[in-house]
Image (cartoon, rainbow, N blue to C red):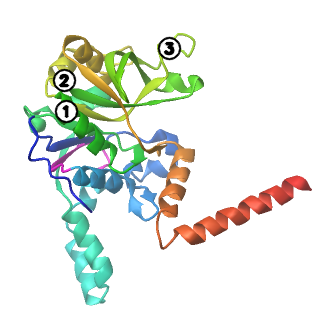
Amino acid sequence: MQIRDRTNSNHKPVRKAVIPVAGLGTRLLPITKSVPKELLPVVDVPAIQVVVEECVNAGIEEVIFITGRGKGGIEDHFDYNFELEKILERRGKLEELERVRSISQLIRTIAVRQKKPLGLGHAVLCARDVVEDEPFVVLLPDDLIGSEPSVTCQLIDVYEKYGQGVVSIMPVPEEEVSRYGIVTGENWAPSLHRVRSIVEKPDPEISPSNLAVIGRYLLPPAIFGFLEDQKPDESGEIQLTDALSKLARERALVGYEFTGRRHDIGDKLGFLTANISYALQRDDLGPKLLHYLRKKVVEADEQQSH
């Protein structure tokens, strides 16, 4: 894994990442009744590890998990497991041993408990004492985005050029805008937008655009002040989009149309397509899986023709 060197930036370096993992994963029930959705496998790697590896690749030094009840397994996954390592060593399974050890050595992790489910904005606010006065990235683990360089790298590149907060955005079909925060603003350079505000889950008939905020953010520490002053919405949650709108009005916020393929693995279909997509990229699985899929397409065509 190639890790980016960002020591020559003119702005304060982005060293920390916040990953909210306190969600219940209700869209994936019943499996998430007992297994944290972040530990569900993408082929043979927990989804949360894919997101953490994106951080490592971008030069992030510390990951802050915002956790909730029943999510201790996420912390355990990135910790040492001496018993397992001893068993693998004793059985001569050296390749598996190296893989297990490498996970615990990926990056420094900190867990902060979100004691009440008060929304994404509140989850980010929980990281304030650990982030302190530094810019930081927020990665929503439901969103896996395959790209090279990673979306986190792309956002850091934009931040280093302009010195402002950045949110990743992508166009979505008109009928899907009510599922996202939608940006208003002006396009002022290729893939770059001056964000004026973010409308949370608008009705398609009155949506200001089709540009949706996707689960990667690079935020200045000033966002904590806006979150602290933010009043809860009708459901009692503190919305990150409201604080981002205030940041956009009072300072600046860049919307960046990232390059990459996004999978929403909090959705059952998105989870399946992510597994297929990532498996197809692997030398040990891709060719055989592709052969299988092609065979199933032929069988499906034959069934429809009868």
| Distance (Cα) linking label 2 and label 1 | 20 Å
Image position, residue 277 (x, y; %): 51, 56
Which quadrant does the N terminus fall into? Answer: bottom left
| Distance (Cα) linking label 1 and label 3 | 30 Å
Comparing 2 with 279, the one in front is 2
Q: Amino acid at mark 3?
A: Ser
Pointer 1 residue: 161
Picture quadrant of residue 180: top left
Pointer 2 residue: 223
- In the structure shown, which secondary structural element does the residue marked by tag 3 occupy? loop
Q: Residue at x 29, y 72 (%)?
A: 99
The answer to whether marks 1 and 3 mark residues whose Cβ atoms lie closer than 8 Å is: no
Circle 1 or circle 3, nearest the eye: 1
Up-down relation of residue 190 to residue 25 (above or below): above
Q: Residues within 10 Å of mark 3 (few under 14, many from 20)?
A: some
The answer to whether marks 2 and 3 mark residues whose Cβ atoms lie closer than 8 Å is: no
Pointer 3 residue: 207
The region drawn magenta spans 59-71
Q: Is residue 70 magenta?
A: yes
- In the structure shown, which secondary structural element does the residue marked by tag 1 occupy? helix
Q: Residue at x 19, y 67 (%)?
A: 80
Which quadrant does the C terminus fall into? Answer: bottom right
- Disc on the earlier residue, 1 or 3: 1
Circle 2 or circle 1, nearest the eye: 1
Q: Amino acid at mark 2?
A: Ile
Q: Residues within 10 Å of mark 1 (few under 14, many from 20)?
A: few
Picture quadrant of residue 248: top left
Q: Is residue 174 left or right of residue 156?
A: right
